[in-house]
Amino acid sequence: MNKSEWEKNIKKFAETLSHPAWGHHHSERVLKLSIHLAKKQNHDIDIDSIIAASYIHDVGAFPEYRVNDMDHSDRSIDLAEEILVNRHFPVEKIKIVKDVIKGHMFYRKPSSRIESIIFHDSDVLDFMGFIGVTRILAIVGLDDWTPDLKSAVRLIKKFRKELYGKLHTPLAKEIGKAREKEMEQFITKLSSETNDLKYI
């Protein structure tokens, strides 16, 4: 099966995973940003593995696939081979996809593979800036990270302080600085309109 077929099949699967913060739109953003970071920094990456990882890296977070007390990244790795083989992804590249998924979260360190580093940076950046704020606000009441609005704002403040330090590549850090400022702008404006966040 050619690339266009397996890519279409995996993308179609990803589109069934609907969520306001880590659904298929998040996958598309991370894919596009990973390609941008690689291209602009002259990194030669295995694009097939990035495509596959983009579409399935969060699958373990969805109720129909989640396992209690298991990190969603690890669950996604467990599911990766079956999902990819069934959609005719090249078997010899599944190991790379699993490596990329393993280190994608901000609280994990990517391996030394450039694909893992680039993908990690892209996923972290999608939790920063106005898109990051939007994603966090979108899960208020839906996720244990954000049971209410005040907890969501606390998480935004925490991410503004901490996520930049999780970035690895120079271009990701450049983008991260701009997104950090966007988060600060949001917090400052919200504070001014809510008596220093007391009335939210």
Image (cartoon, rainbow, N blue to C red):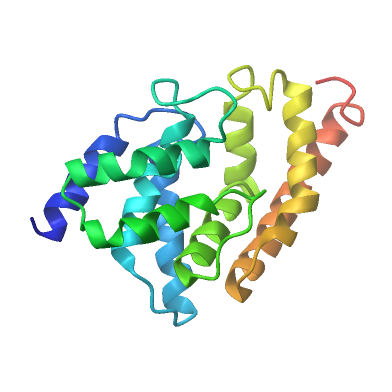
Residue 123 in the image: state x and y as whole percent: 54, 52
Compared across the picture, whether 56 is left or right of 198 comes to left
Residue 169 in the image: state x and y as whole percent: 60, 72
- On screen, residue 80 above or below 103: above
Q: Residue furthest left?
A: 1
Residue 24 in the image: state x and y as whole percent: 37, 39
Report the front residue among 158 and 174. 158
- On screen, residue 88 above or below 34: above
Q: Residue at x 16, y 49 (%)?
A: 88
Q: Residue at x 25, y 46 (%)?
A: 84
Compared across the picture, whether 36 is left or right of 171 comes to left
Answer with the quarter of the image where residue 173 lies: bottom right
Q: Residue furthest bottom?
A: 42
Picture quarter with the N terminus: bottom left
- On screen, residue 125 above or below 167: above
Report the front residue among 6 and 76. 76
Picture quarter with the C terminus: top right
Report the front residue among 144 and 101. 101
Q: Residue at x 38, y 73 (%)?
A: 45
Q: Residue at x 79, y 41 (%)?
A: 157
Compared across the picture, whether 6 is left or right of 113 comes to left
Compared across the picture, whether 58 is left or right of 56 comes to right
